[in-house]
Amino acid sequence: MSRSARYAVFGHPVAHSLSPRIHAAFGDQTGIAVDYAAIDAAPGAFADAPADFAGSGGDGANVTLPHKEAAFALANTRSDRAQRAGAVNTLVRRGGTWHGDNTDGAGLVRDLTDRHGLDRRGRRTLLIGAGGAARGVAGALLDAGVDGLTIVNRTPERADALADALGEPGRVHPRYLERVGESGEFDLIVNATSAGRGGAVPALPRALVGMRTAAVDLNYGEASVPFLAWARAHGVREAIDGLGMLVEQAAESFALWHGVRPETDPVFDALQARNAALVSAD
Ligand code: NDP
């Protein structure tokens, strides 16, 4: 009897992940039988996990915090966007080896463009954070035509390293977090830190926000509350959480695995309604 292909998200912790729900919804919508599980892999246990998974029928996987850089290292081949990010969030089984890709940046740009009608061209953009998620979205923001990308991070050396890796010194400017107020207003402020998971927000001055500033948090649910509250309190024109990006990056992974691009709006609407109920119930 033939065994159907298996998919999974690897992370630590991962029990909270919405990815199994999203991929099941895409499967229902497209008529593709999707066997997609959440697999908790502690940092020391991740190195062998994709090979073990392949041995039991694994054909594709998402990789989330904290394993994206380890997934990059173990992939046998990599897409250009994964190469640029130095991080992999999607593994695709090809000819008995793992191909690494990164769909985070495409997911963010598609959410901002298609769902929120936000034109990134010519926008002065501030990226806060230099971890795996920031690495995933920085190249896509540049490709989408932002007018200069300023990068700040709690650990400034990581902002410098990300700026170097992007290889566009004329457009990418690492700055000290404490001095970012000197850079003036930004049209787009992207929070790619995990500070909100602990209820915190990086210390940001009011001077960053102008009349047409849009603020985007890659986090969603409770973790997005501190940054988006800061943004609204400072009068941003639009405050967007990371739920749309989550659904869009998942759709991009689904298309890589199954060759079909699912409709994202119904899945996004259902998750947003559920999330709103959860946040307001707290
Ligand atoms: P990493 O652990 O790789 O990086 C964390 C980043 O947050 C680093 O830049 C770190 O700075 C910074 N940071 C952590 N705590 C604080 C703090 N208290 N104050 C200031 N900065 C802080 O995580 P990822 O980059 O993978 O993920 C970041 C967030 O983005 C996560 O919460 C994740 O859930 C979310 N995400 C959402 C996605 C979506 O589809 N919507 C996709 C991917 C991620 P330092 O370098 O100094 O440690």
Image (cartoon, rainbow, N blue to C red):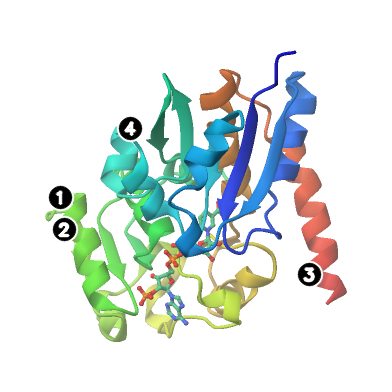
Looking at marks 3 and 2 on the same chain, the residue that comes earlier in the sequence is marked by: 2
Residue 194, position as x, y percentages in the image: 50, 71
Q: CA distance from mark 3 to mark 2?
A: 38 Å
Query: Left or right of 22: which side holds 261?
Result: left
- Nearest the camera: 231 or 227? 227
- Left or right: where does residue 7 sit relative to residue 277? left
Q: Secondary structure at mark 3?
A: helix
Q: As drawn, is 116 to the left or to the right of 106? A: right
Left or right relative to 139: residue 200: right
Tell me, yes or no, whether the two marked residues, 1 and 2, touch with CB atoms within 8 Å: yes
Residue highlighted by disc 1: 167
Question: What separation in Å lies between label 1 and label 2 (alpha carbons)?
Answer: 5 Å
**Three-letter amino acid code of the residue under disc 4:** Ser
The quarter of the image holding the N terminus is top right
Q: Residue at x 75, y 44 (%)?
A: 21
Q: Which quadrant of the structure image shows residue 196?
A: bottom right
**Is tag 4's residue or tag 2's residue first in the polypeptide sequence?**
4
- Residue 279's disc number: 3
Q: Residue at x 47, y 63 (%)?
A: 43
Callout 2 crowding tier (Cα within 10 Å): few <14, some 14–19, many ≥20? some
